[in-house]
Image (cartoon, rainbow, N blue to C red):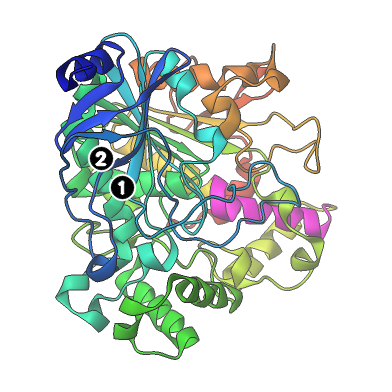
Amino acid sequence: MPPEEKQRSRSQAGCLVRVAQGLLEGRIEAAVKVFKGIPYASPPIGPLRFRAPQAPGCWTGVRPATRFADAAPQPSDPGFFPGDPDAMPQVAMSEDCLYLNVWAPAVAGPHPVLVWLHGGSQILGGTARPVYDGTAFAGAGIVCVTVGFRLGALGYLELGSLLGADYAESGNNGLADQLAALRWVHDNIVAFGGDATRVTLGGDSAGAKNVAALMASPAAKELFRAAILQSGGAETVYDVGAAREVAARYLATTGIDAPELLAMAVPDLLAAQQRLLAGGGQRFPFRPIYGTALLPEAPLARIRRAAAGFQAVLIGTTRDEIGPMLPDNLLGADWLAELLAHLTPDEMADIERHAGRAFLGVPVTELRRQLTVAEEYWVPSIRLAEACVSAGIPTWMYRFDFALPTGPLSGSAPHNADLLPSWSAPSRYDGLVAARMHDLIVDVVRGHRVNWPAYDLPDRTTALIGETLILANHPGRPTVDLFSASP
């Protein structure tokens, strides 16, 4: 078959798409157009290590887009328990990791777009996790995009003061990668039938925290109009001084000078990262940094003051978050910094003293589980919702209360329990309100419709999603009120 006829046949089959860099060939899977491993920036390798993402190169001919690209370098994911099926699978890893994937409806657009940022504490995760399969969204008339980005030290180590101007804001490279992906979507998504003016940015866990940071970034303005944040908040960030302290601690674990990091083998970079994590200190040492060009001020303050213009924000948590995964031996000792995302052990000890008087008879370990969950997830999510309301953004909030029926965490609604039903409708939820999580996400992306009252003050109406749907005003208020000081 002549090349012209072969190209026409591919195009008629719906598998050939032209983007700014060249022609892509994907596949039709389950009546959905699927394109995997699309480069949205140049590989951040060699002289580009620790540098801001650069524009992607072009190619000639047809580039296959039929398999996931390598994941960002990361340690092995142990999951929340031995054999955890939701742990990041063992996949190929490489610094060459700035790729995205697209699932698009087979019918012509324009369709609304959902761009999703994966979770993983900024050190784990990737788009190859089976849960991030966009087929169900494409089947509902949405172009779904998942994004790979740099993690850990390669994405969040602030080296500008040590390596010079070329490495300014290296501590925000993971966030800058996500911004580059959003720009790529803005420029190219029409080729997949997407509407660049109707982009919703969503994320879970660390991905949700990145969504909040991008809501506060002037550089991301106009690149998305709505946001979905599952178990996130806007407070897991550092100022420049704190980020430089983390970089100094990281370097101390290596015994080398900063310039030598540029040629250090990836396994050695990861080993130093693990030593840093094992050395104590606040959870999540790798975070977006404010007080920079990309993020001029603390996200919560910026959203409260200057985030008007977003059309909708959906914020969710789970009832138990990481509480069921915390071992009793950690909860029975004094507060440890590595359990805390935002406060110091002394601050938590003070909150616990007040909690002991408010929750008489509650065992210490159970009380500490609740306080730990509130410190990392509930309180930051509520503060973010309140900031959005203050900015005039239509905002809805839910808490996922459906208790897992089987497995080591049965009886609880743990962290990420809402993720799988958001991406599909697994049989375990048949006939239950929890099964409608996917429909909820679809409704927000397609038309910003939510079937319960918007979050406001002072009611703080929140949907408790489980076997049924219950509307509650300010659920968990006695616990949340213990953290009343504003950040």
Q: In which quarter of the image is residue 330?
A: bottom right
Quadrant in which the C terminus appears: bottom left
**Which residue bears the numbered disc 2?**
182
**Which residue bears the numbered disc 1?**
178
> Is 4 above or below relative to 298?
above
Q: In this view, does 250 lie to the left or right of 177?
A: right
> Is 316 above or below relative to 99?
above
- Count of numbered marks: 2
User: Alpha carbon of mark 2 to alpha carbon of mark 1: how far?
Assistant: 6 Å
Type of amino acid at the residue the image marks with label 1: Gln
Q: Where residue 464 sits in the image (x, y, percent)?
A: 62, 26
Query: Which type of secondary structure does the marked residue at label 2 adopt?
Result: helix
Q: Can residue 197 be seen at all in this image of the molecule?
A: no
Magenta span dominant secondary structure: helix
Instruction: Rate crowding at label 2 as few (under 14), some (14 to 19) or many (20 or more) other CA atoms within 10 Å.
Output: many
In magenta, the rendered stretch is 362-378
Q: Which residue is drawn at 64% across and 36% down?
A: 417
Q: Where residue 39 sits in the image (x, y, percent)?
A: 28, 44
Query: Farthest top residue?
Result: 107
Pick the front one: 199 or 460: 199
Q: Which residue is drawn at 37% across and 44% down?
A: 211
Does the magenta segment cover residue 366? yes
Pick the front one: 477 or 89: 89
